[in-house]
Image (tube, helix red, strand yellow):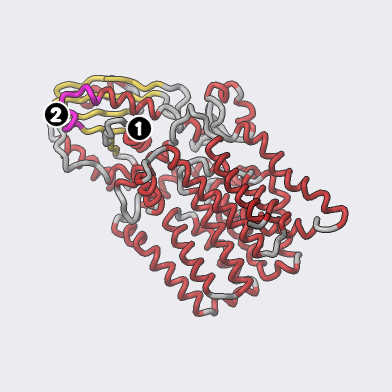
Amino acid sequence: MKKETWILFGFIVLKFLLQYAVIDAEYDLQRDEFLYLDQAHHLAWGFSSVPPFTSWISFLIYLLGNSVFWVKFFPALFGALTIYIVWCSIKELDGDLFALILGGTCILFSALLRLNMLYQPNSFDVLSWTTLYFLLIKYFKSENSKWLFYGCIIFALGFLNKYNILFLIIGIFPAILITHQRKIFFEKSFYIALTIGLILIAPNLIWQYANNFPVVHHLNELTRTQLVHVHRLDFLKNQLLFYTGSLLVIGAGIYALLFYSPFYKYRSFFWAFIFTLIVFLYLRAKDYYAIGLYPVYIAFGSVYISYLFRAGWKRYFQPVLIMMPIIVFIPFYQIAFPNKSPEYITTHKKAYKKLGLLRWEDGRDHDLPQDFADMLGWKELAVKVDSIYNLLPHPETTIILCDNYGQAGAINYYSKRKVVASSFNSDYIDWLPLEDRNTDAVLVKENDDEDKNRQTEIPLFDTVYLAARRINSYAREDTISIYVLKGAKVDINERIKAEAIRKQNQR
């Protein structure tokens, strides 16, 4: 193998090693991961939470054994492929070995290391953005229409993974329109590719229509509960944190798109950067939605910096430029990952607070970063539910109802008996086991108002009692109560069905 191939292989191996090293064994899987893993058992062309692509990966993880190793493998894989696509972009831009190493280092030691530690649609989303931009580079360079067809496939996969890729399209279209590359809009192949892309995403669009567009309800709820706490200035400040060690490279790439003559044919990318950020700002998007925007500019910047530092005394600065992302990343490694115990973090909150890591979606600061708090107490909850479930006289006719998808998903993942828990929350409302004959119930409640919970259910059952509590002061849900309801005086399924209809009508 050539030298550069060995170096690329080293980047890939190091990427996987780091991804498995950044999470301490004290942490469980994260709340959202449980939901996505459960989608493997309910394959469809869409879900109220996300499009269908993640469920396909979840099904593959299930076939491979559903272990934590495989759960963490796929986001790491998507991160490794992002490095590879940036590498290919640099080669396409005629970058040398120094440019390749610089670009690979910038991508490896960045916020992607944190993003890729969780099994969520975000990792493939960044890969989709980076790949689509790469295919545009290929098309602008060669004007070969096959790259448009490949691009429509990548867009479709990105869309079926996370609708966030629409921001890329919204940003790139006007950018192309105001540059000489507007001639693409007069190409027949462009419209053929566009049609193919629409056909590929049509099953999900049809599913959305058939289910009254749950994505609209999801976006409205997101706007009302989370995006309202997003401040545009904070959005801009946080962009500087994602690739802190690579800001020089990104800035160089943006500058070069305007003033470096070999990049003239790629000038659309400069305007795409501006337009995409404007759209994110206008809609008060979450800061991490824009992470996929930057890898291609790292490719441009790496090539341009390589040109500037190629000859003479300047070439001696090449190792310094490569080391910069690593040096800047080291302090971030100490606080940006769940590699410290909750006890350590709560006694060293100042550093976490300074970077805004303690601010949750509710706009307030807490003791732990939200993702970390969402990775605690789940296995213990499943063990407690299992122990209660094993003591019930008729477990086969007992339904487990949870307050939210995190509780239901954690019980389904960690339960030794493979107990199927349900919820009226998120996708679980569509998976309620109403065909079963249920006479008893186990309620998993985040609200620990015991008297209120008992008074609500006592008229409907012969026996209602608090069976256990899962208490973890570091978890996002610090107290979870588990109630047993025996001897139903009403038809549980009819009651559940009525509640499900009410919740579905709300969304």
Residue 429 position by quadrant? top left
Question: Residue 494: horizontal and vertical position, in percent?
Answer: 16, 39
* Label 2 packing within 10 angstroms: few (<14), some (14-19), many (20+): some
Q: Element under label 1? A: helix
Of the 4 image quadrants, the one containing the N terminus is bottom right
Q: Is residue 97 left or right of residue 74?
A: right
What's drawn in magenta, residue-wise? 389-398
Question: Residue 92: horizontal and vertical position, in percent?
Answer: 65, 65
* Label 1 packing within 10 angstroms: few (<14), some (14-19), many (20+): many
Q: Check the image and name the residue furthest to the front.
A: 1
Disc on the earlier residue, 2 or 1? 1
Residue 342: in sight, yes or no?
A: yes
The answer to the question of whether label 2 and label 1 lie on touching residues, with beta carbons closer than 8 A, is no
Find residue 414 and name its label.
1
Q: Residue at x 50, y 43 (%)?
A: 228
Question: Residue 317: horizontal and vertical position, in percent?
Answer: 81, 49
Q: Element under label 2? A: strand
Q: Is residue 468 left or right of residue 167?
A: left
Q: Main secondary structure of the magenta part?
A: helix
Residue 364: in sight, yes or no?
A: no
Closer to the camera in the image, 229 or 357: 357
Q: Is residue 94 left or right of residue 65?
A: right
Closer to the camera in the image, 128 or 466: 128
Identify the residue position indicated by label 2 in the image. Answer: 488
Membership of 230 in magenta stretch: no
